[in-house]
Image (cartoon, rainbow, N blue to C red):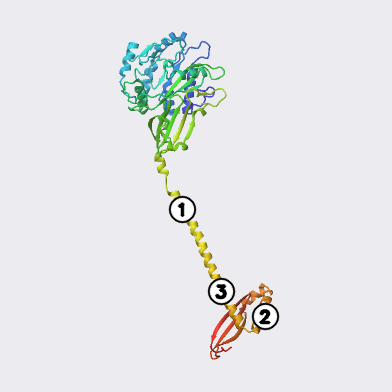
Amino acid sequence: MKRGMYNDDDDDSGSNRWRKIVCRVSDSHPTIPSFRPFVTMSDFQEQAANTRALSGVLFVQLHPIVQLEDRAKWEQYSVNNSQWIQEGRDYQDRYTTVPDVDGGAMEELMYEFVGAYNTPSPRIFILDETFSPAEETGPGPYYPIWTSSPVLAAPREMTNLNLVSLAVDRPFMEKTYESGMISLGGMTVDEPGDVDSPIVGTNFYAYLLSFAAGEKTPYLGDPMSSLYVPVFDEYDSRTRKIVAMIKSTLNWATYFRNVLTPNALPVRVVLENSCDGAFTYDVSGQEVNYIGKGDLHNSKFDDMVETADFSQWVELEETDHLGFGIHQDLCPYNLRVYPTLELEDDNYSFRPFLITLSVALVFLFSIGMFFVYDRLVERRQKLVMATAMTNLAVVSNLFPKNVRDRVYAAEEEELAAKKAGTKAKLKSFADGTSRSFYFLFAVFGNNCTVCRYFWLHRLVFGSRTVSSLYIVGNSLPSL
């Protein structure tokens, strides 16, 4: 297929498969005013099966648009070209597992209408309020079911059923026809059950789920929706006309499955549209559980909601005139995701509190150690100062004036020595030379019988001066 924008046969994405189906249908139609919708795609099953596998939809069916004047010719064409039904079933038998189900009551109803078993209806028909087949008597246009994938077991394939006659499909098909845009239908539900259920809707949904799973699978009563895609007679939106429509049936739970990591705790998903209300799911790990109809999330988490508005999804192909617009006016959708109590319990922990407390204690300990150190230094300085003041008082009281004058002279000499420069100081230190001053004085007791001799040693060593006061004893030391 090498035409227009659809020239990437190597792209197996779901959207490209949709384009291929639409393109193949369009290529099969002559773009002339006398167009008649008599088309059967020879590889519809292969294309549609790949589309279903990649996109996750359960059912794809083509509906040619038949006008009243073409009805008789179409009905004859559908009878003469019904071989696609058996060819489709043969294809499915080779590549898929088809559920073995009984036709049930619908088989008898179709037999009464058609007059034969396992034979498609030769006339366009409708289903009345009791789901019994009845001939379509309306003026058209008609949207009969034609090629479909999978091909359902008789009599479920419902060839030539005028789908627009069903209330659940009519507004969306009409809107797609009028606007030339894709329409996302409403959400439909039926009673839970399996393929043996006598309820037509339950039976149909269970069959689609069983076909997709390859084994009998019950329908859980969760919502299904349909997507309506227009098929045009040419590509250019400025001149093209709708000649057919493709309807796909999807199960919403399919799109919530396998989106989280395997060990992820559940989140609550609320899917809602303005026509049918809300439906609630629990998505846990790679599994999804349908909870029920209504918004059933925990109101405790209202302020933690994450919302996706489907109205922002407006264009399937962002091109000037080749793409498909998406119509959102009838039943706009939105998706809301909330946490659950399980998720809260797993994330509710004292660890942040403990970490914060530990950091605070480290700061408090550091501040405490600073104050203790400050007090100890202050106490030491007071002791040193008190000792110095005591020694100063002793020297002042005990030294004669001439001795003090000699001390002061020594201080002046020391200051002069400091001016000699660093080199002289280093030399003095390296040579080990120093200057010492010795002062000897005596303190006599009151009775002058006990004498105490003190030795005041003042050492000038480089730029430092060390003074020491020694108690020599009761006798004068020899110098």
Picture residue at 46% right of the left edge, 31% below the top:
335
User: Residue 235 lies in what quarter of the image?
Assistant: top right
Q: Amino acid at mark 3?
A: Ala
Q: Secondary structure at mark 1?
A: helix
**Residue 409 bears which disc, if any?**
2
Mark sitting earlier along the chain (2/3): 3
Q: Is residue 411 above or below residue 212?
A: below
Picture residue at 55% right of the left edge, 71% below the top:
382
Query: From mark 1 to mark 2, how far is it between C-alphas?
Result: 63 Å
- Residue 410: give x, y in percent of width and height: 66, 80
- Residue 205: give x, y in percent of width and height: 37, 24
Mark sitting earlier along the chain (1/2): 1
Q: Amino acid at mark 2?
A: Ala
Asked whether 244 or 471 is in front, the reply is: 471
Query: From mark 2 to mark 3, how far is it between C-alphas?
Result: 26 Å
**Residue 386 bears which disc, if any?**
3
**Residue 357 bears which disc, if any?**
1
Q: Is residue 389 above or below residue 317?
A: below
- Residue 437: give x, y in percent of width and height: 62, 82
Q: Amino acid at mark 1?
A: Leu
